[in-house]
Image (tube, rainbow, N blue to C red):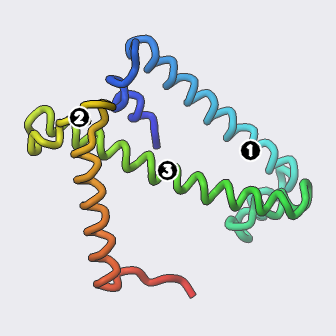
């Protein structure tokens, strides 16, 4: 999730022909490096022979058990907080990406042209943002009213 964002937000860059490929490769390298380090670290903690069995026992606590044992209980709280922040950031990114899609489709006339308007002062796609926010609110209200959510007990 996110590699397509480099193309979506290209028109906001000063030199997209240089900035976008660079940002894409740096993002891929950082994410891959983080995954490699995380996988190596957790494998070192549980051991190569038992890591898979430990993951199958309880994937939801797989990393938390190791973090608490190695770093202390504070690290579990920090990981949980970072997870919440990252989920919010993902939702915000998804919102911005939809705004840009609506903006581009409105600008090209595939959706109402008003979606392709930008805020005069900032150049942001404010009409597309409002439309996306209203659609999300309508879907959320519909889900709550129809009781589509079945929260775990």
Residue located 71% across and 38% down the image? 36
Task: Give how far apart the Cα atoms at labels 2 and 3 are.
Answer: 24 Å
- Pointer 2 local density, CA inside 10 Å: few below 14, some 14–19, many at least 20: some
Q: What residue sits right under mark 2 in the picture?
A: 118
Whole-percent x, y for residue 24 in the image: 49, 25
Mark number, residue 1: none
Whole-percent x, y for residue 129 in the image: 29, 48
Compared to 40, does 150 lie above or below?
Answer: below
Whole-percent x, y for residue 106 in the image: 14, 39
| Residue sitting nearer the eye, 38 or 130 | 130
Foreground tag (1 vs 2):
2
Q: Quadrant of the C terminus?
A: bottom right
- Pointer 3 local density, CA inside 10 Å: few below 14, some 14–19, many at least 20: some
In the rendered structure, the answer to whether residue 87 lies left or right of residue 144 reads right
Q: In which image quadrant can residue 139 be found?
A: bottom left
For marks 1 and 3 on the same chain, the one whose residue lies earlier in the sequence:
1
Compared to 135, does 6 lie above or below?
Answer: above
In the rendered structure, the answer to whether residue 84 lies left or right of residue 78 reads left
Foreground tag (1 vs 3):
3
In the rendered structure, the answer to whether residue 69 lies left or right of residue 84 reads right
Element assignment for label 1: helix
- Pointer 1 local density, CA inside 10 Å: few below 14, some 14–19, many at least 20: few
For marks 1 and 2 on the same chain, the one whose residue lies earlier in the sequence:
1
Q: What residue sits right under mark 1 in the picture?
A: 38
Mark number, residue 90: 3
């Amino acid at each position: 999730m996110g590699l397509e964002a480099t193309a979506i937000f290209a028109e906001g860059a000063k030199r997209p022909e240089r900035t976008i490929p660079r940002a894409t490769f740096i993002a891929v390298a950082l994410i891959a490096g983080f995954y490699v380090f995380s996988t190596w670290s957790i494998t070192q903690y549980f051991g190569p022979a038992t890591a898979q069995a430990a993951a199958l026992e309880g994937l939801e606590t797989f990393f938390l058990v190791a973090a608490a044992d190695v770093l202390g209980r504070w690290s579990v709280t920090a990981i949980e907080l970072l997870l919440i922040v990252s989920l919010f950031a993902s939702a915000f990114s998804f919102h911005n990406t939809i705004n840009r899609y609506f903006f581009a489709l409105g600008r090209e006339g595939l959706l109402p042209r008003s979606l392709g308007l930008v805020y005069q002062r900032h150049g942001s796609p404010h009409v597309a943002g409002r439309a996306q926010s209203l659609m999300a609110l309508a879907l959320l209200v519909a889900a709550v009213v129809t009781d589509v959510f079945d929260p775990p007990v």
